Amino acid sequence: MNTMFVLAGTDDIWEVVDRAISLHEMNSEQFDAGLGITTDDQAEILGMVSHVMSNPNEGGVLLHRDDKGEIAGMAVLRIHNSRGLITHLWVRQDFRNKGIGHALVLDSVNYLKSMGVYAVNAGVAERHNVMHNLLTKAGFRRITATYQFDWEK
């Protein structure tokens, strides 16, 4: 299995948007049964992904590709006021429980640190216990409903 994570380039934008929408839809069905994905959700994903991919100083998209070169997981990252944010993290269902989500979180933290942020946050809905556990395992600490990763000083 390919374990290399890469920063998506602008050439990848439509593939990334398409996969992000399908992964978001899959997660909505699994974690928010019956809600599905709306055209507003799709427009939000398109806007967010295209913005960070077109403005690398404001974030990026980290990808994990499978052996066939298809996107198996991704993390959407934002940078604002010297603070990093993991806005979305998706892993294809057939790649779950293989360490990809954990590696995406750690690679996101390392990438954001290399961009000069002093902390990384991730907002997670209360009902997403898997993500809460993933962030805690990666070294984040809970701050109300937000998680933050701090480097040792």
Image (spheres, rainbow, N blue to C red):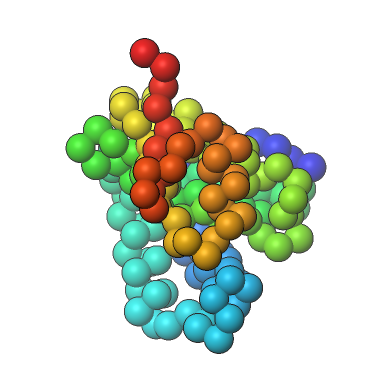
Tell me the residue at 52%/82% (across/down): 36
Q: Position of residue 8 (x, y in %)?
A: 48, 46
- Work out which residue is located at the far front of the displayed protein and give it: 144
Q: Is residue 21 above or below residue 40?
A: above
Q: Position of residue 137 (x, y in %)?
A: 60, 37
Q: Looking at the image, is 46 positioned above or below residue 135? A: below
Relative horizontal placement of residue 10, taking residue 97 as reference (left or right): left
Residue toward you, 36 or 64: 36
Q: What residue is drawn where x is 70% and y is 42%?
A: 99
Q: Quadrant of the N terminus?
A: top right
Q: Quadrant of the C terminus?
A: top left
Q: Give residue 103's position: percent from left, percent from top.
A: 62, 38
- Judged left or right of residue 61, residue 143 is left
Task: Please identify the quarter of the rendering in which residue 19 is found.
Answer: bottom right
Instruction: Give coordinates of residue 45: x percent, y percent.
Output: 40, 66
On the question of residue 11 being in view, the answer is: no
Classify residue 111 as left or right of residue 23.
Answer: left
Task: Mark yes or no: residue 140 visible.
Answer: yes
Q: Which of these two is toward me, 78 or 66?
A: 78
Residue that lies at the very extreme toward the right in this rendered image: 1
